[in-house]
Image (cartoon, helix red, strand yellow):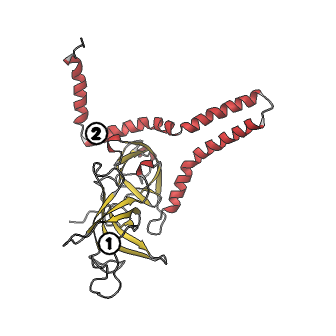
Amino acid sequence: MAPSLNPRSAAPMVLAIMACISLPPARADALRGMVCGTLAPIWSFCGSGRACLASCVQSGVRLLGGAVDDVSAPERIAALEVDNLLLRERLRHLEAVLGQSQDLSVSGEQPQLLPANVIARDRAQWTNCMWVDAGTNTGSPLLQKGSPVVVGSHLIGVIDYVGKRQSRVRLISDPSLVPSVRILRYAEDGTAQYLAKGELQGLKRDQVTDTLLRGVGFNYDFGDCYGPARDLLSGRPVGQNEGEPTSLARAGDLLVTTGMDGLFPEGLQVATVEKVMPLKPGAYSFSLLARPSAGSLDALHTVLILAARPFERPKS
């Protein structure tokens, strides 16, 4: 006969569960950050397991070399291969940071940036957020809530929580993050053409299994410094009936930030258009599907953090 559960012994566990569920968002974020910061060394150890194993092999080879004066050529080659492997593991992070910083250029200037490593992902929000190993302990003024996060010149998210030793990145695949973007198309001669403007947001997890973004509200109803307003159907400048028509968006076009959302700087690459939805009768804008230009957001290891844009409240 199975033993019955004592209500008194179960009461503390029930109270603990209820307390965790009823935590306010700020306390919950702090608790998640503490757990991620505590588990970060384990995460790093697992990620560098190959290097640890190689180090053990290297120590064994060196010990053997100390015991035997005449080390054979194959053993020396093996030791050199281990050294090479360790150096590659140590340089991987530096190469990634250097390559990204060289690719990144916002408004023709090299911005200040803070490199960080991905240390954990929330299983409940795997496609929406991740944790990096940079917190207030770095002392960097770049790291704050609202700081854009990039891989090279590609936008991947924004810092939405800063802890002591770790921070959380809200990815562009999260439906709650809606960057303002516009179409950037390059002609055969390399000339850049800026076209329709709209917004991007991630699809809900139950809607799609792949990382896709949904674009909404794309049109060119108002002219700007990049050109005049254009007709939604023909793509010609408003008021001009002559000239060859052009599509305001098509598959393969690049989507870049406009800077008009007050969160991200202008010119960051966000996604590539996969499909443009047919224009519905009477619609004043069109929708599209796009894929992040940074590639798979599940395979990120090193990211760069940019300074948050200053927010000025209007004077009353």
Residue at position x 43%, y 52% in the image: 296
- Regarding mark 1 in the picture, which secondary structure is present there? strand
How many numbered discs, if any? 2
Q: Which residue is mark 1?
A: 196
Vertical arrangement, residue 225 with respect to residue 171, above or below: below
The mark that comes first in sequence, 2 or 1, is 2
User: Residue 13: image x %, image y %?
Assistant: 25, 24
**Does residue 8 appear left or right of residue 295 in this picture?**
left
Residue at position x 36%, y 53% in the image: 211
Question: In the rendered structure, which amino acid carries the disc numbered 1?
Answer: Ala
Q: Which quarter of the figure is the N terminus placed in?
A: top left
Give the CA separation, mark 2 to mark 1: 42 Å
Q: Residue furthest bottom?
A: 242
**Does residue 165 appear left or right of residue 84 in this picture?**
left
Can residue 148 be seen in this snapshot?
no
Residue at position x 37%, y 54% in the image: 157
**Does residue 265 appear left or right of residue 301 in this picture?**
left
- Regarding mark 2 in the picture, which secondary structure is present there? helix
Residue at position x 22%, y 72% in the image: 284
Disc 2 + disc 1, Cβ < 8 Å: no
User: Residue 163: image x %, image y %?
Assistant: 37, 43
Q: Residues within 10 Å of mark 2 (few under 14, many from 20)?
A: few
Vertical arrangement, residue 158 with respect to residue 20, above or below: below
Q: Which residue is mark 2?
A: 27
Question: In the rendered structure, which amino acid carries the disc numbered 2?
Answer: Arg
Q: Residue furthest top?
A: 1
User: Residue 131: image x %, image y %?
Assistant: 40, 45
Q: Which quarter of the figure is the C terminus placed in?
A: bottom left
User: Residue 171: image x %, image y %?
Assistant: 36, 52
Can residue 29 be seen in this snapshot?
yes
Residue 166 or residue 10, whichever sits in front: 10
